[in-house]
Amino acid sequence: MEDTGHYNFSIKKFLLTNSYKVALINPLTTKNLRKATLKSVKSDKEDAILIAKTLLDKDYYHIASIQEEKLSEAKELTRYRTKLTIEMNRKKTILQRHVDIVFPEFNTLFRNEYTVTYLNILREYGDAYTIAHTDVRFLRISKYQNVGKLIKFAEVNPYISESGEFSADKTIITKKGSKYLRTTLYRVIIPVILFNPVFHNYYHLKRRQGKGHLCSLGIV
């Protein structure tokens, strides 16, 4: 058969897997031989005859193997990965150009660029003014009359599971509020614990009481 790239991958793999001997011919070889015959007709029938005649000369073909097939698959995957990497870098360059124009200080807020949080903030808010005023536009803390209502908005309060005299000792947070607010709170609380003695001591108090790390962060 003619070695026509991905068009013959499936049938070639099938034949090799079933122990058939597969001979591959470079399409350029058949094209040049067709020109040499001076025939103006090109059809499936004529091509089949030409390929059969080409197989009479072993210099015009090579025998495929399972190892060669695996190498071809690996080569295709490598090329595809390279193509994706080039495309991703191109889009990063475009994104960075817009970030530099709209909010040049944005990258200084992150240790690593293009993380999930980095991209989610850009996707959700889009410009420097919106990001800078997120707490005013979306949280509006002043409208909450007490801490409990603010906690309910973020839904970082623990899920309560009780039935009769049973009360679960360990539960997860409800996670029904603003996921962006919860993410922000968890990112903020870590440096607060490190540098604020009150929060530092309270966090370690909960750890000594047997609470896990994430649970203690949620409580703080």
Image (cartoon, grey):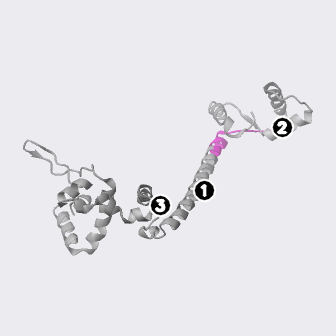
Give the mark toward the camera: 1 or 2. Answer: 1
> With 105 as the anchor, is 79 left or right in this view?
right
Q: Secondary structure at mark 1?
A: helix
Circle 2 Cα neighbour tier, 10 Å, few/some/many (<14 / 14–19 / ≥20): few
Q: CA distance from mark 3 to mark 2?
A: 49 Å
What residue is drawn where x is 52% and y is 67%? 100
What range of the chain is rendered magenta? 60-72
Q: Residue furthest left?
A: 165
The residue indicated by pointer 2 is 31
N-terminal of the pair, mark 3 or mark 2, is 2
Q: Amino acid at mark 2?
A: Lys
Query: Which x, y percent locates residue 177?
Result: 28, 51
Q: Quadrant of the C terminus?
A: bottom left
Say what secondary structure mark 3 lies in: loop
Instruction: State the residue position of label 1.
Output: 86
The residue under the point 67% across, 43% down is 68
Q: Is residue 212 visible?
A: no
Mark 3, residue position? 114
Q: Which of 150 and 219 lies nearest the eye of the viewer?
A: 150
